[in-house]
Amino acid sequence: MTKSQIAVLIIAAGYSSRMHDFKPLLPFGRTSAVQRLIQTYQAHGLKHIYVVVGHRQDEMRDVLKDEDVSIVYNENYDKGMFSSIQKGVRAIDETLSAFYMQPVDIPLIKVQSLERLYEAYARERKGVIYPTFLGRKGHPPLIDMKYKEQILASNGEGGLKKVLEVFGNDALHVNVSEQSVLMDMDTQEDYENLLRYEAMSVPNKEECLAMMLQNEVPEHIIKHCEAVEAMACKVYEQIASFGLGVDKNVLSAAALVHDISRKEKNHALVGAQKLRAMGYEAIGDIIATHMDIEVDENAPLNANELLFLADKLVSEDEVCGFEKRFARAFQKCEGNLDAQSNITKRLNATKAIIAKIVNLTCKAFPYG
């Protein structure tokens, strides 16, 4: 099974009546919603991209004239989305094996989510693969072409959902860590939420939790990360007014997932590589130093130091202060000189970071 056998059906034919604007052409950065989806599926490696048009088809054709896509016109677009799905399914090359059913009003789907759906389909060969985010089913489903005739034979009552629910035993739900599989734009408020989501360069708290669950991180480690994140934000608030250029959102996300690979050897570096592979370079760079760090006492405080410090102020999911934390560590490694040497280096780094905070704020550090 290769991606050359997979298509995507982008449904962009409706009136967009609740939006009071035309969804396919709403801007996202320098492109439109429909073009954004085309770019995403091309980045995913798909060659067979079908766009079903209807309402304002002339504008759509003009926008898509330079895109490498197949345009399918649904003359019955006024009958609703399912009529466009049926029209698109008829147009899909019969040699293809499956297709993503992609509504244009869910435009910020990410390649990582598509990769997980494709991998699950190639591995399990189930008839319908659904993305789920924290237990909620989203879009796009990846549908095997063996259900083509059932889709075409339906009278449309209940839509595609009604057709596919009959084949529940042949369905697979795949956890993804991108909330965008749930985020549509039926209203102007929805669209504004999507713009805010797109502007974020880091995963939000729900996505961080989904990443941890996807990587089978135990609950007690997740609680530890949440406690470290809370501490990192408290320390950040102490220095926020001094203009150091630390991005709170990046720091927060890094803290929430800093132990994503805790069960593995050299977990800080392994976790960093994992986040970089997901496209979160800045988070990966911060995670990489949360166990061991070189502190330049003459340089401004940075996010790496704040995460390192927050981690050393929390034992399990409780704030304990660094002195108690390190006392426990020394006791645990009694007799192991190499381990105690490493602990000493971390203790000195912790004290150096605290000293930088004290010198900056001219206040005593409250978490000793």
Image (cartoon, rainbow, N blue to C red):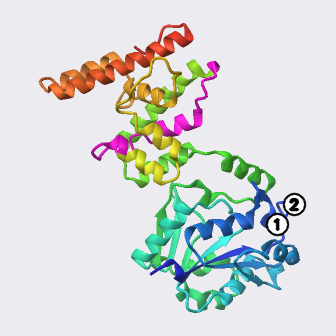
Mark 1 neighbour density, 10 Å: few (under 14) some (14–19) many (20 or more): some
For mark 2, give the secondary structure: loop
Q: CA distance from mark 2 to mark 1?
A: 7 Å
Question: In the rendered structure, does residue 124 fall within the stretch colored magenta?
Answer: no
156 versus 25 height, above or below: below
- Decide which of 351, 103 is in the foreground and name it: 351
Q: Badge 2 is on which residue?
A: 20
Q: Which residues are magenta?
A: 241-269
Q: Is residue 327 shown left or right of residue 311?
A: left
Amino acid at pointer 1: Ser
- Say which residue label 1 marks: 16
Magenta-span inclusion, residue 254: yes
Residue in the picture at 38% in, 29% down: 293
Query: Do tag 2 and tag 1 residues touch (Cβ < 8 Å)?
Result: yes
Q: Residue at x 53, y 34 (%)?
A: 251
Give the image location of residue 143, x and y in percent: 55, 79
Name the quadrant of the C terminus: top left
Residue 366 visible in this rendered orientation of the protein: no
- 143 relative position to 153: left or right: left
Q: Secondary structure at mark 1?
A: loop
Q: Nearer the viewer, residue 283 or 365?
A: 283
* Badge 2 amino acid: His
Residue name at image x 59 percent, y 63 percent = 138
Q: Is residue 350 above or below residue 364?
A: below
On the image, the x and y values in percent for residue 62 come to: 84, 74
Count of all numbered marks drawn on residues in the image: 2
Q: Quadrant of the N terminus?
A: bottom left
Instruction: Check the image and report above or below for 211 versus 118.
Output: above
Does residue 213 appear in the picture of this structure?
yes
Residue 224 position within the rendered picture, expressed as x and y whole percent measured from the top left: 39, 35
Query: Residue at (59%, 88%) from the top-left corner?
Result: 148
Say left or right for 279 vs 17.
left
